[in-house]
Image: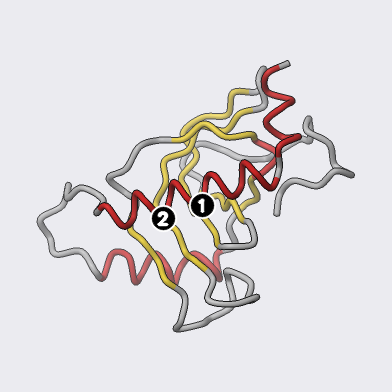
Amino acid sequence: MGFSSKQGFLQEQPFQPCQIVCLEDATGCLYAEVIQIVEARQICWVRPLLLTLKASNIDCWEENKSHSWYDLRSGSDLFYPLALFRAALDTEILPLLSALYASDTGSGGEPVDQTGHHQLRQFIQSVWQSYPDAFGALSA
């Protein structure tokens, strides 16, 4: 994961708008597009693309057909601590994006289903509970 207590909260991140980043925890990975970095508050404004949930103790980027994934492109943007993100590797995101766009029906603009919303809420809550110090630094 991007956050490490050794790195601290004010680490330099080379993220740029439109870059794909990953927010990872023990349950899965959220891949999102960077909209803007709010440096003064060390927050990353991202637009979620997809959420992968791990079937077991497998890294998100390892190929595993038992991973569940959810299309979040029509969902809400997030503001999350910058230190929790890492750059997504091309080798991990390209197969996922291929599957994501291959699943499109062509109608576009379809809302995220309720299962995707529910899974995203659970994932975000899990990250929040796993890294409370990252969020405490934002309120200071």
Rendering quarter of residue 92: bottom right
Q: Residue at x 49, y 66 (%)?
A: 53
List x then y, in percent, for residue 134.
72, 35
Q: Could you classify mark 2 by the number of other residues whose Cα lies within 10 Å: few (under 14), some (14-19), or many (20 or more)?
A: some
Q: Quadrant of the N terminus?
A: bottom right
Q: Amino acid at mark 1?
A: Phe
Point out which mark residue 71 bears: none
Which type of secondary structure does the marked residue at label 2 adopt? helix
Figure check: 45 above or below 38:
below
Residue of label 1:
123
In the image, taking residue 114 as reference, residue 36 lies left or right, namely right
Q: Residue 34 at what x, y percent from top left?
A: 50, 39
From the top left corner, tell me how far across and down residue 103 is, in percent.
Answer: 24, 69
Task: Looking at this view, name the residue that lies furthest to the left.
Answer: 107
Q: Is residue 128 above or below residue 69?
A: above
**Quarter of the image with the C terminus in it:** top right
Depth check, front residue: 16 or 97: 97
Q: Residue at x 34, y 49 (%)?
A: 117
Residue type for callout 2: Gln
Left or right of 4 in this view: 81: left
Residue corresponding to mark 2: 119
Question: What residue is shown at x 65% (from left), y 36% (from top)?
Answer: 82
Tell me: 42 left or right of 6: left
Q: Are marks 1 and 2 in contact (CB under 8 Å)?
A: yes
Q: CA distance from mark 1 to mark 2?
A: 6 Å
Relative to 84, say whether 102 is above or below. Answer: below
Q: Secondary structure at mark 1?
A: helix
Front residue of this view, candidates 13 and 42: 42
Rendering quarter of residue 83:
top right
List the single residue furthest toward the right. Answer: 6
Residue 9 position, x and y percent, is: 78, 33
